[in-house]
C-alpha cells in the first residue's frame, strides 16, 4: 500500500545529492552558532571557500539579515580583483563588513615585518586576534576544510581557542552526531568551520550549481609571473625579484586566493567553472601544495600556525 | 551522487592504514605532493616501504609517536558516491574516539587479521558499531595472502563472528576476504580467491543501499532558530528554522509543538530557492505555520498522532569520555537536539565489559572510555525517542558544568520513567 507520505519520501530520497547533504549540514552548523553565541562573525576573504560560506548563510537566515557581520583580515597585499569582488558582493548582500588591517597592526607596532620575508601571512594572526578581542567576538566562522591539510583533518567543527587564541590539538572536545558543544568561558572563543566536510571538488560543483560569481583571478588570464620556490608568483609591488628570476607573460589562474606574496598561480586555460571542475578532477597535486609557499615550509607548519591562533 | 559516511577502527598492525591508503590512492584521494611528503618521511626514518599511516596521522604527537590518537576525516569519491571516512584508532584506550567516529557513520569496516582470527578488538569494534546504531557492517578479513588465500580460514572466521554477532543489533553484515597490501578484493575482484563470489570492498561501499536507513515515519523537527526579518518587505514573516531529524513534513500537515502541545498547520516550507512541498532528513528548511503560536529554540514540531515521549527522566547507555570519572549524583549540562538542560545522574545500574559484553553490577563510577547504563533526571521536559528508532532524537551529550568539556555520549534506551519490566537488553 502506497500512501502520499511514501510517494513523497521516495522521491525525496532520489533528489538529495551529496551537495544537498553537505549544504544541509553547513546550514545547521551556522544556525547552531547564531543561536548559541552572543557575537559571531564570519571571515570573508573573497576566496572560493568563504564565498560558499556566504551562500550557506543566505540559505540559513534569509529572508532576514545575517545575525552577524562579515570580517576581512586585509594583509595589504591582496589581489585588487579580489578586493573589488569583496566589496561588490558585500554590497549586493546588504550585509556589514569589518576590515581588520594588518598594515594598521604594523603602524601601531603590534607586529613587525620580518626582514627579508615579504609574506604577511603569519602577521595576520595578531590582527585577527586583536579584532576578535576589540569587537568581543565569541565565535568566528572560517571556511577551512578538512581535506586541505593533515592538521585540519583532525580539527573539530567547533574548535575551541583559549585566551591567547591558541589551538590545543590534544585537548579537543569529542564531537558527536550533530550535537555541537558551544559552551565557552570568558576570554575563550570558538572557531567554527561549517564546510569542514567539503572537498575542493564539492566547492566548485556547488559554485557551478548555485551559479555563484567568483573573482576573475580564478579563471585563466594573462599575467606577468616569475618562478620562485617551484611556483609561479605574480610580479607585484610587494616582491623584489632577484636577478635570476626572470619575468614572463603566461596564461595562468589561481586555485587559491591569498596574499600576493605567497600565492602561486598555475598555468591553466580554464576559462569557466566547468573547465575548473575538469581540471580539479584531473589534478594530481593538492591546492595548497601547488600554490602556497607558506605550507610547504615544514611538515607541521599548519599545525604550528594554528596553535598560535592562525585561522 | 549520494554520500556515504563510514568509519574504520584498527590498530597499527592490522593493515587499516594500508587499506585506507589503497582506497584513497586508487580513487585519487591522495595527491602526488602528499605521497612525496610521506615517502620522504618514510625514507628519513629508514622504513623499507612507504608508511601510508603517515597520511592519516595529522598531528605532530601522532607522527612522533607513530600512533593514531584522534579521529581523522578523509574524503574520496568515485563516479557513484562521495565518501567520508572517520578513521579512528582501535585500541581500548581510544574507545571514545571510536564512539565519536561511529556516531555519524552509515557503515563500519571491522578489520580482522586472517592469521589471528576474531580477537577481542574485533568484537569491541562490532559492539561499538552496534551500540551507536550503525546499520551496516563490513567484516574485512585482511592479510588473506598470508594464509595462502585459504577459503577454510575465511569461513571459520565468518562462522565465529556471525555466531557472536547474533547478540548485536546489526542486521546487515558483509564478509569480504581481502589483502590490502596486494589489493585483492579491495577495488578489483581477486583472482587469487576464485571461491569468493561476493563484491569487492569498494563495489560494496558504492552499492550498499542506505536510502532505507533514514527514519521517514516519525516526524520530528527540532526548532533551531526563529527567523523574523522585521523588515518592511517581510513584515509578517515568522519561520521556524531547523533540520528535519526524522520523518516527512508536508505543506498542509497538522502539527503539534512540544512541549507546549499547541497545534497548528504547516502553511509553507521555505528555502532560499523557493518553497518545497515536503521535507525529510537531512534537509535544513524553514517551516511557517498558519497560526501565530509561541515557539522557540528547543521546541519540537511533530505530528499529533505520532509524538515522542515528553519527560524529565530517561534511561540510557553512556560512553564516558573524560579523565574525571562519572559518579552517581553528579550534575551536568545535557544537550539533546537543540535544547540544553541541567541533568543529574541518579543511578549507575551497571557497566558493560566492552570485550565480553558482560554486565558488571554494583559499580560506583564510570571511568574514561567505559560504557554503562544510567538513569538521568533533567530540569525541564525533553522530547525523547529511543536511540534505535532515531539517532538524532535519541542521542545526547553531557557537558561538565565547570570545564564545559563534553564528557559523555548518551544513547536513550528508555525515554521517560522506569517501567516495571525493563525492555532493555534486547539489543545487547
Image (spheres, grey):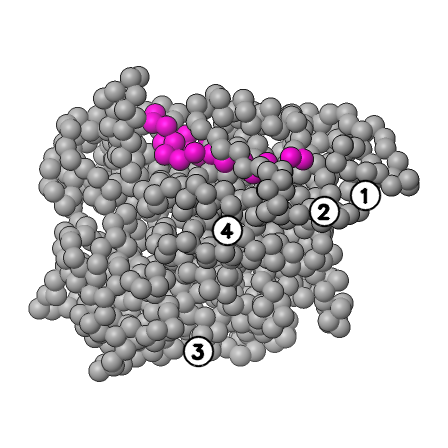
Q: Which mark is residue A228?
A: 1
Within the image, what quadrant is residue A85 found in? top right
Chain ID for label 2? A
Q: Is residue A191 above or below residue A233?
A: below
Residue that appears at 21% across and 39% down:
B296
Q: Are marks 1 and 2 in contact (CB under 8 Å)?
A: yes
Q: Position of residue A48 (x, y in %)?
A: 57, 34
Q: Position of residue B173 (x, y in %)?
A: 42, 62
Q: Can the viewer see residue B409 in this picture?
A: no
Q: Quadrant of the C terminus of chain B?
A: bottom left
Residue marked by disc 4: B84
Q: Is residue B223 magenta?
A: no
Q: Can the viewer see residue B153 in this picture?
A: yes
- The lab-note entry on whether marks 3 and 2 share a chain reads no
Question: In the current view of this chain or complex, which residue is farthest to the left?
Answer: B420
Whole-number angstrom distance, CA of label 3 to CA of label 2: 46 Å
Q: Which structural element holds mark 2?
A: loop
Image position of A229 (left or right of B420): right
- For disc 1, the neighbor class at 10 Å (few under 14, some 14 to 19, many from 20) is some
Q: Are marks 1 and 4 in contact (CB under 8 Å)?
A: no
Q: Is residue A65 magenta?
A: yes
Residue that appears at 29% across and 17% down:
B232
Image position of A124 (left or right of A58): right
- For disc 2, the neighbor class at 10 Å (few under 14, some 14 to 19, many from 20) is some
Residue marked by disc 2: A293
Q: Are marks 4 and 3 in contact (CB under 8 Å)?
A: no
Chain ID for label 3? B
- For disc 3, the neighbor class at 10 Å (few under 14, some 14 to 19, many from 20) is few
Stretch in magenta: A55-77
- The lab-note entry on whether marks 1 and 3 share a chain reads no
Q: Position of residue B265 (x, y in %)?
A: 16, 30
Whole-number angstrom distance, CA of label 4 to CA of label 2: 28 Å
Amino acid at each position: 500500500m502506497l500512501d502520499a507520505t511514501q510517494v513523497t519520501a521516495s522521491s525525496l530520497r532520489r533528489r538529495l545529492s551529496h551537495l544537498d547533504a553537505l549544504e544541509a549540514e553547513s546550514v545547521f552548523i551556522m544556525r547552531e552558532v547564531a543561536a548559541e553565541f552572543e557575537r559571531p562573525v564570519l571571515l570573508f576573504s573573497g576566496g572560493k571557500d568563504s564565498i560558499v560560506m556566504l551562500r550557506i548563510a543566505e540559505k540559513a537566515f534569509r529572508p532576514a539579515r545575517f545575525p552577524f557581520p562579515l570580517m576581512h583580515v586585509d594583509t595589504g597585499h591582496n589581489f585588487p580583483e579580489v578586493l573589488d569582488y569583496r566589496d561588490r558582493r558585500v554590497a549586493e548582500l546588504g550585509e556589514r563588513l569589518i576590515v581588520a588591517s594588518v598594515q594598521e597592526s604594523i603602524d601601531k607596532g603590534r607586529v613587525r615585518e620580518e626582514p627579508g620575508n615579504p609574506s604577511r601571512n603569519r602577521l595576520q594572526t595578531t590582527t585577527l586576534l586583536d579584532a576578535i578581542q576589540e569587537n568581543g567576538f565569541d565565535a568566528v566562522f572560517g571556511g577551512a576544510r578538512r581535506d586541505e591539510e593533515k592538521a585540519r583533518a583532525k580539527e573539530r567543527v567547533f574548535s575551541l581557542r583559549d585566551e591567547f587564541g591558541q589551538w590545543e590539538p590534544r585537548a579537543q572536545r569529542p564531537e558527536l552526531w550533530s550535537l555541537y558543544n558551544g559552551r565557552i568561558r570568558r576570554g575563550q572563543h570558538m572557531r567554527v568551520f561549517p564546510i569542514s566536510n567539503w572537498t575542493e571538488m564539492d566547492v566548485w560543483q556547488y559554485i557551478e550549481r548555485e551559479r555563484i560569481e567568483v573573482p576573475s583571478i580564478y579563471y585563466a588570464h594573462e599575467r606577468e609571473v616569475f618562478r620562485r620556490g617551484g611556483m609561479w608568483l605574480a610580479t607585484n609591488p610587494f616582491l623584489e625579484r632577484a636577478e635570476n628570476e626572470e619575468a614572463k607573460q603566461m596564461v595562468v589562474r589561481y586555485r587559491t586566493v591569498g596574499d600576493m606574496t605567497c600565492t602561486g598561480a598555475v598555468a591553466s586555460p580554464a576559462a569557466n567553472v566547468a573547465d575548473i571542475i575538469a581540471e580539479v578532477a584531473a589534478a594530481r597535486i593538492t591546492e595548497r601544495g601547488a600554490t602556497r609557499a607558506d605550507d610547504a615550509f615544514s611538515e607541521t607548519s599548519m599545525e604550528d600556525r594554528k596553535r598560535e591562533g592562525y585561522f | 551522487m549520494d554520500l556515504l559516511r563510514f568509519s574504520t577502527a584498527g590498530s597499527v598492525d592490522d593493515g587499516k592504514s594500508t587499506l585506507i591508503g589503497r582506497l584513497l590512492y586508487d580513487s585519487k584521494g591522495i595527491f602526488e605532493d602528499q605521497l612525496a611528503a610521506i615517502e620522504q618521511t618514510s625514507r628519513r626514518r629508514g622504513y623499507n616501504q612507504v608508511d601510508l599511516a603517515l597520511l592519516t596521522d595529522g598531528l605532530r604527537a601522532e607522527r612522533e609517536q607513530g600512533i593514531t590518537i584522534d579521529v581523522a576525516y578523509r574524503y574520496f569519491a568515485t563516479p557513484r558516491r562521495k565518501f567520508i571516512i572517520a578513521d579512528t584508532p582501535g585500541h581500548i584506550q581510544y574507545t571514545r574516539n571510536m564512539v565519536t567516529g561511529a556516531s555519524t557513520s552509515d557503515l563500519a569496516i571491522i578489520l580482522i587479521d586472517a592469521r589471528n582470527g576474531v580477537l577481542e578488538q574485533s568484537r569491541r569494534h562490532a559492539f561499538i558499531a552496534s551500540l551507536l546504531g550503525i546499520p551496516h557492517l563490513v567484516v574485512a578479513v585482511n592479510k588473506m595472502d598470508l594464509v595462502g588465500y585459504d577459503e577454510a580460514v575465511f569461513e571459520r572466521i565468518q562462522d565465529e563472528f556471525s555466531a557472536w554477532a547474533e547478540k548485536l543489533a546489526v542486521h546487515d553484515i558483509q564478509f569480504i576476504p581481502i589483502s590490502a597490501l596486494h589489493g585483492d578484493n579491495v577495488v578489483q575482484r581477486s583472482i587469487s580467491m576464485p571461491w569468493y563470489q561476493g563484491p569487492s570492498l569498494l563495489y560494496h561501499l558504492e552499492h550498499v543501499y542506505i536510502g532505507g536507513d533514514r527514519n521517514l515515519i516519525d516526524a520530528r523537527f527540532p526548532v533551531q532558530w526563529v527567523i523574523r526579518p522585521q523588515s518592511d518587505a517581510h513584515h509578517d514573516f515568522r519561520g521556524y528554522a531547523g533540520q528535519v531529524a526524522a520523518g516527512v513534513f508536508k505543506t498542509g500537515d497538522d502539527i503539534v509543538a512540544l512541549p507546549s502541545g499547541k497545534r497548528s498547520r504547516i502553511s509553507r516550507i521555505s528555502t532560499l530557492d523557493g518553497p518545497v512541498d515536503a521535507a525529510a532528513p537531512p534537509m535544513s528548511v524553514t517551516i511557517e505555520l498558519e497560526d501565530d503560536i509561541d515557539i522557540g529554540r528547543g521546541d519540537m514540531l511533530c505530528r499529533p498522532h505520532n509524538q515522542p515521549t515528553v519527560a524529565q527522566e530517561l534511561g540510557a547507555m553512556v560512553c564516558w569520555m573524560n579523565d574525571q570519572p562519572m559518579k552517581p549524583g553528579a550534575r551536568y549540562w545535557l544537550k539533546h537536539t537543540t535544547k540544553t538542560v541541567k541533568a543529574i545522574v541518579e543511578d549507575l545500574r551497571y557497566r558493560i565489559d566492552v570485550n565480553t559484553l558482560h554486565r558488571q553490577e554494583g559499580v560506583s563510577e564510570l571511568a574514561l572510555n567505559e560504557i554503562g547504563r544510567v538513569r538521568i533526571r533533567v530540569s525541564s521536559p525533553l522530547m525523547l525517542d529511543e536511540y534505535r528508532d532515531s539517532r538524532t532524537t535519541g542521542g545526547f551529550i553531557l557537558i561538565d558544568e565547570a570545564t564545559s568539556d563534553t564528557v559523555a555520549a548518551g544513547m536513550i534506551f528508555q525515554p521517560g520513567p522506569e517501567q516495571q519490566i525493563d525492555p532493555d537488553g534486547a539489543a545487547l
